[in-house]
Amino acid sequence: MQKVSVVYFLTRSLFLGFGISLLFSISSKDAYLGAICGLLVGIFLTFIYSYLIKKKGDKSILDILSNKGILGIIVRIILIAVSFIILLYMLVSYKEFVGAFLLVNSPELYFLIPIIILTLYLALKGFKIISRVASCLIPFSIILSLISFVGLVVFFEPSNFLPILSTKFDGFVKTAFAFAGISFLPNLLTIHLKGDIKGYTKIYILASSFIILTIICVNGVFGPALVNIFRFPEYMVLKQLKLFKFIEKIENVISCSWILDLFITMSMAIFSLKELIGTKHAKKITIALVLGALFILEIFFDTDYINELKIYYILPNLSLILILLTLFSLYLVLRKIKD
């Protein structure tokens, strides 16, 4: 369980501020149905990926790539690009979410620098430490997710789900593949795991199920008309909750489950960069890349909302392209390795 605990957070991480809103923009109130179909596609991807990691055995991916010549260099560049892109998405999500709802009046660097320092520290300690932290945080995330779902059920409007299956077939297909891509892409960071991975698919299904429950909650409370109005509808829906009918603002506590997703995924992305660089100066180069991502964030996503919309809309296609490219390249690298 501890070895694959990070999969829970990785699977959920790209949905905050990006994934859930995208699914609603494609298939409106049928988004949860498309997401269920997407879960099946994602399970298929996890089977393929688990097979490739098992085929890798106890060898590190860097050792394998080092013996594959030009192909190894190309695959290494692809994996570094995937890790960096995921890191950048995490930074954008964190900046937008925390800056818009939690620390509205604070300068961005005041809440960006602490999480960068924490994730860098965790990543440089290695995967074993990241895995232990993730294992400790999973119960808190699950409890917070269950509290939000149980508390929001009473606000559901059945009419928000009707009529069922009003989305065209191509809409369901797009939603399914978008969900599969968004949920599975960060899991490519687990390429550094060794040996047979037990429980990988189960953890993926658990995390995806909570995402689907979140989609159901958002649709059940807001309906298709309001969902597309709000930024971060998964957070806005939590404003309906009250504790003992008089304690308000508990959404800031419950939404911490999303911050945990970003924290673990950011740590894994930085760890992946360090492992793939693989030189004696790997730590210094990794820190430079993280600072480069922060620079890109401040230059291109500080006040330019157009750039944020661009990475928002390209996420489904980008995720699927990166997944297929990575899986195919890994297959080429690992196909001659004996099981």
Image (cartoon, rainbow, N blue to C red):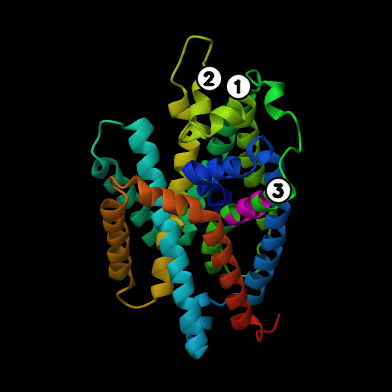
Q: Earlier in the sequence, mark 3 or mark 1?
A: 1
Q: Could you tell which of marks 2 and 1 lies nearer the N-terminus?
A: 1
Packing grade of label 2 (10 A; few <14, some 14-19, many >=20) is some
Q: Read off the magenta span.
A: 175-181
**Amino acid type, residue under disc 1 in the picture:** Gly
Residue 172 visible to an observer of this rendering? yes
| C-alpha gap between disc 2 and disc 1 | 9 Å
Vertical comparison of 331 with 13: above or below: below
Q: Disc 1 designates what residue?
A: 151
Residue 203 visible, this angle: no
Q: Residues at badges 2 and 1 in contact (C-beta under 8 Å)?
A: yes
Vertical relation: 120 (above or below) 72: above
Choose between 278 and 132: the one closer to the eye.
278
Which residue is label 2 attached to? 240
- Residue 141 sits inside the magenta stretch: no
Residue bearing the label numbered 3: 172
Q: Is residue 42 above or below residue 36?
A: below
Amino acid at dot 2: Gln
In reply to whether residue 178 is colored magenta, the answer given is yes
Could you tell me residue 176's position as x and y percent?
68, 51
| SS for dot 3 | helix
Q: Report which quarter residue 220 is drawn in.
A: top right
At 26% from the left edge and 54% from the top edge, which residue is drawn? 299
Residue placed at 53% from the left, 52% from the top? 10
Q: Give percent across and percent down for residue 210.
A: 63, 39
What type of secondary structure mainly makes up the magenta span?
Answer: helix
> Is residue 117 found left or right of 267 in the rendered image?
left
Labels 3 & 2 near each other (Cβ < 8 A):
no
Mark nearest the camera among 3 and 1 is: 3
